[in-house]
Amino acid sequence: MSVKTGCAEERKLTSVFERYLTVWVALCIVGGVILGKVAPGVAKYLDGLAITVDKAPVVSIPIAICLFFMMYPIMVKIDFASVIKAGRSGKPVLLTLFVNWCVKPFTMYAIALLFLGFLFRGLIGAEATDLVKIPFGLDLAVGARHGAGTVILADGVKMLQIPLWRSYFAGCILLGVAPCTAMVLVWGYLARGNDGLTLVMVAINSLTMLVLYGLLGGFLLGVGKLPVPWQALLLSIAIYVALPLVSGYLTRQWIIAAKGEAWFREKFLHVLTPVSIIALLATLVLLFSFKGEIILTQPLTILWIAIPLFIQTMLIFWIGYALAKWLKLTYEDAAPAAMIGASNHFEVAIATATMLFGLSSGAALATVVGVLIEVPVMLWLVRICLRTQSWFRR
């Protein structure tokens, strides 16, 4: 994360990657669509480079590499020793945990179901279907029913055919149970929030995700009659959260011990800053090279997915902001506490969607739409926070 130091009024993004992230995402969408048309076999070949168990692809190696480098720079920036100090700021931390894990997953489920399952179902295609991976560990016969899907044979591989809207619904669920742990450092900074508290909440969110992401994600997918691949869920947590978290922690400790904290912050983090976003953009090119045909033939699909995600973001922000006001928090604590729930940890959501359902699935596309709307919406919320500072005590 690259931010300008100085007085609060001068806070702004200085990294060209962060400032124009929406532009880069849009360019990657275009590039991915073009790649899919010009060389349709490239993404399929890369996705075929996978770790398999019982002949079933479980982990796409190229995607796993990209997603590791999306997460590692985030984790290495976190000083987990600050978690110990969280007790001094009990109210904002408890508020964040309550909104993230007791409110957000369930409102996302309800809003996505309302729009994708009812209001937009005909627009998406009531009879349209999507092919997703069979849950890891299941040996189902062709024609067997599982949840809302049917096992079919596609290009010699058993796949689960489910309604297309349910596939988008699954991606929304995975976004809803993934509270932000990275970009909120940027949003909190721009809103002139309490940077120290934001770091504490980021560290706590990273740790709670190790347990709650798989449990809530699996539960809500099951309620929605979608595949519940518990083994793959746990594996995705291990690969995309635990591995970069442990690697980041060990790297941080080793470099600070060897070179000092000043060198770590001024040299190492400076080089590492663009890595996460570059890895994200590479992943998006792959994802959209597979989904290009849908985007070209049904361009409004992005809009149908974006609408419930936008409503969810605004709803969670205002719930968190209102509760912060009710709890009489200072503005510096209220702003990041509200935005950490409103923002999504799209890196983990994309990783989990591609692992559970496949690179070409509607679920993966839905998580990518989350990236597309993330930056402009969160920058709008930053402006709302700055204009409502007078609502809170300083």
Image (tube, helix red, strand yellow):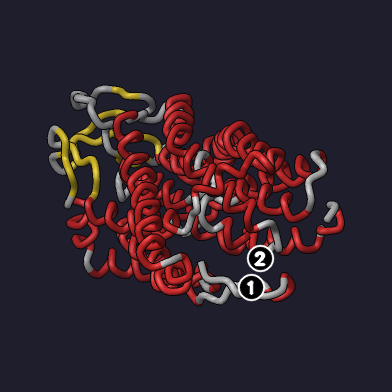
Which quadrant of the rendered structure holds the C terminus?
bottom right
> Which image quadrant for residue 164?
top left
> Residue 68, how many percent across, how many down?
33, 54
Which circle's residue, 1 or 2, is located before the other in the chain?
1
> Residue 320, how many percent across, how many down?
71, 43
Amino acid type at image mark 2: Leu
Which residue is at a point 54% across and 45% down the rendered structure image?
A: 179
Tell whether 154 sits left or right of 82.
left
Q: Circle 1 — which element?
A: loop
Dot 1 alpha-carbon crowd within 10 angstroms: few under 14, some 14 to 19, many 20 or more: some
Please say if the residues under marks 1 and 2 sit with CB atoms less than 8 Å apart: yes
Q: Looking at the image, can residue 43 be seen?
A: yes
Report the number of numbered marks: 2
Cα–Cα gap, marks 1 and 2: 6 Å
Amino acid type at image mark 1: Lys
Q: Nearer the viewer, residue 389 or 149?
A: 389
Tell whether 392 sits left or right of 168.
right
Q: Which residue is mark 1?
A: 12
> Residue 305, how many percent across, how many down?
52, 49
- In this rendering, is residue 312 above or below 68? above
Which residue is at a point 45% across and 57% down the rendered structure image?
A: 74
Q: Looking at the image, can residue 287 be seen?
A: no
> Which image quadrant for residue 353?
top left
Tell whether 119 sits left or right of 227.
right
Q: Which residue is mark 2?
A: 190
Q: Which mark is residue 229?
A: none
